[in-house]
Amino acid sequence: MHVTVGRVALTDLSAVGNEESSTEIRRRVCIARVRQNARYARMQGVACNAHAAGRWIDAYGGVTSDARCLLHRAAEGLALSARGYHRVLKVARTIADLDESDSVAEVHVAEALRYRQARS
């Protein structure tokens, strides 16, 4: 996964905002990892979404019908391969885990699609 980040204005570097602290981010990541470990406890060699089979996540990952519909439209519109489709799905499942959500919602798929590297 590649995320392109634009320049930060100098005035924004010293601005006080409501950003999430590193401690809070670490807490969410630890919770997401525990969720994933529990989800894949019975699957040998799988401890996280990245290692799970895409078809397994598609079938048992708690993908809502709205999320699946968005993913299918995006797969057609972006001409995603099966591998690309499953990569988006795995990232969306991870985003849902970070949100402490049992299901992958449309918003999770939309965010995962934004992380796809643009093709030139």
Image (cartoon, rainbow, N blue to C red):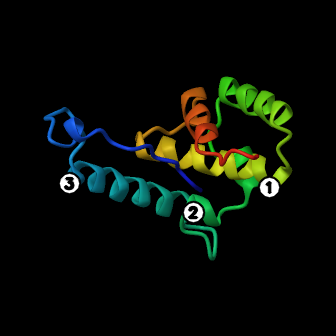
The x, y position of residue 16, in whole percent, is 13, 35
Q: Which of marks 2 and 1 is in front?
A: 1
Q: Helix or strand or loop: what does disc 3 sit on?
A: helix
Drawn side of residue 58 relative to residue 93, left or right: right
User: What residue is rendered at 76% in x and 46% in y?
Assistant: 120
Residue 8, numbered circle? none
- What residue would you read off at disc 3? 23
- Residue 6: image x %, image y %? 44, 43
Residue, disc 2: 40
Q: Looking at the image, which residue is at 57% across and 55% down? A: 2
SS at circle 2: loop
The answer to whether 72 appears left or right of 106 in the picture is: right
| Inter-mark Cα distance, 2 to 1 | 20 Å
Q: In which quarter of the view is residue 113 placed? A: top right
Residue behind mark 1: 83
Mark 2 or mark 3, whichever is nearer to me = 3
Image quarter hosting the N terminus: bottom right
Label 1 or label 3, whichever comes before in sequence order = 3
Q: How crowded is mark 1: few (under 14 residues within 10 Å), some or many (20 or more)?
A: few
Residue type at tag 3:
Thr
Identified at 40% across, 60% down, the residue is: 34
Residue 75 placement (x, y as % from top left): 81, 36
Residue type at mark 1 is: Arg
Of the two numbered discs 2 and 3 on the same chain, state the one appearing first in sequence.
3
In the image, 76 versus 13, the foreground residue is: 13
* Residue 106, x across and y down, in percent: 60, 27
**Outermost top residue:** 66
Identity, as a three-letter code, of the amino acid under mark 2: Tyr
Q: Are marks 2 and 1 in contact (CB under 8 Å)?
A: no
